[in-house]
Image (cartoon, rainbow, N blue to C red):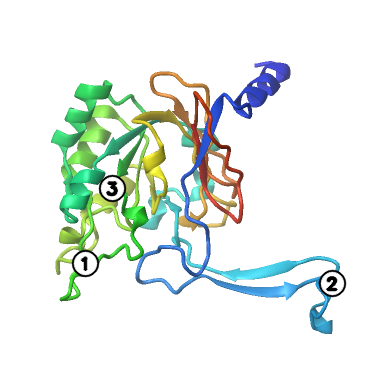
Amino acid sequence: MPALDLWNLASQLKSTDYRWVNLTHTLSCDTPHWFGFKPFESTKLLDYLPGTPEDMLAPMRCFQYSVASQYGTHVDAPRHFHVEGRSLGEIEPIEFMHPLCVIDKHEECAANPDFILTIEDLKAWEDEHGRIPEDAFVAFRSDWSKLADLENKDEDGQPHYPGWDLGAIKWLVEERDIGAIGHEPADTDPASVTTREDAYPYPGEQYILSVDRYQIEVMDHLDELPATAPSSSAPSPRCVMASDIPHVSLRSAPRHKFPCVCSSKYGHPVHATWPGGIQSIRRPIRGRLFMGR
């Protein structure tokens, strides 16, 4: 495609004909994350404001961060569970470009926090929206991102959160040849599976990464997306031997029946977009992941 055509496409996507929606949690000590990780830590190294200690005074502001690789919204690469699997640095940017399908089960999850997404749910979605296309990014909307505590423990300390049925993930891979999955909880599998004594390695997560797919966990704002929309995911900077890393970026493309998801490998926010009356345009801030539509 000639450079001018690409420039025109970029201008079109940045116009008010498209709406952009953030799909990541802001990275901070309050960011939802898997219970086994320490909270995000930030240390100011240099600053230019009056009152800054002399040994930190400089014409710039710099921070040092300490954060687990799967903290908040993040991409899991195959190597996360499989030593022979590909790392993020081995996945080419074009491989993050997919059609996006959003399976909305937030009402079912509100009624039953242990809800499990099954093959029947996927087939019902297809009855309404059409066949899930090859290489799709399939996102499971549960509205779990709205909870302060992703584990949602009861009075006895037992976690309750929704997840994928292993059979549903296998069906998506084997029957629809999807490219990736995403969800709002910190686990692929539901709490009813992950809390069993024989749960590890978790079957759903183990499987999706074993077949050379990636997944995005702890997603946000899936409630602002239609059932089909363009999106793109971008794992953060290339890290040697990285199996996962926080911050993912999703961008958009012109809308088709199943718009596409694309991503770069550099730590930019995630977006999804689609044409239509735009009400607001959100800008990437503080390492957020955005999706435009």
Q: Position of residue 155 (x, y in %)?
A: 17, 75
State which tag comes first along the sequence, 1 or 3.
3
What residue do we see at 18% from left, 63% from top?
199
Q: Residue at 22% across / 29% down in the picture?
A: 125
Q: Mark 3 packing: few (<14 Cα in 10 Å), some, or many (20+)?
A: many
Q: Give the residue pinned by disc 3.
A: 142
* Amino acid at circle 1: Pro
Residue at image position (42%, 29%) is 229
What crowding class fits label 2: few (fewer than 14 Cα within 10 Å), some (14-19), or many (20 or more)? some
Question: Residue 165: in sight, yes or no?
Answer: no
Q: Earlier in the sequence, mark 2 or mark 3?
A: 2
- The quadrant where residue 51 appears: bottom right
Badge 2 marks a residue whose secondary structure is loop
Marked residue nearer the N-terminal end (1 or 2) = 2
Residue that label 2 marks: 58
User: Residue sitting at 36 percent across and 64 percent down?
Assistant: 148
Q: In the drawing, does residue 94 fall left or right of residue 144?
A: right
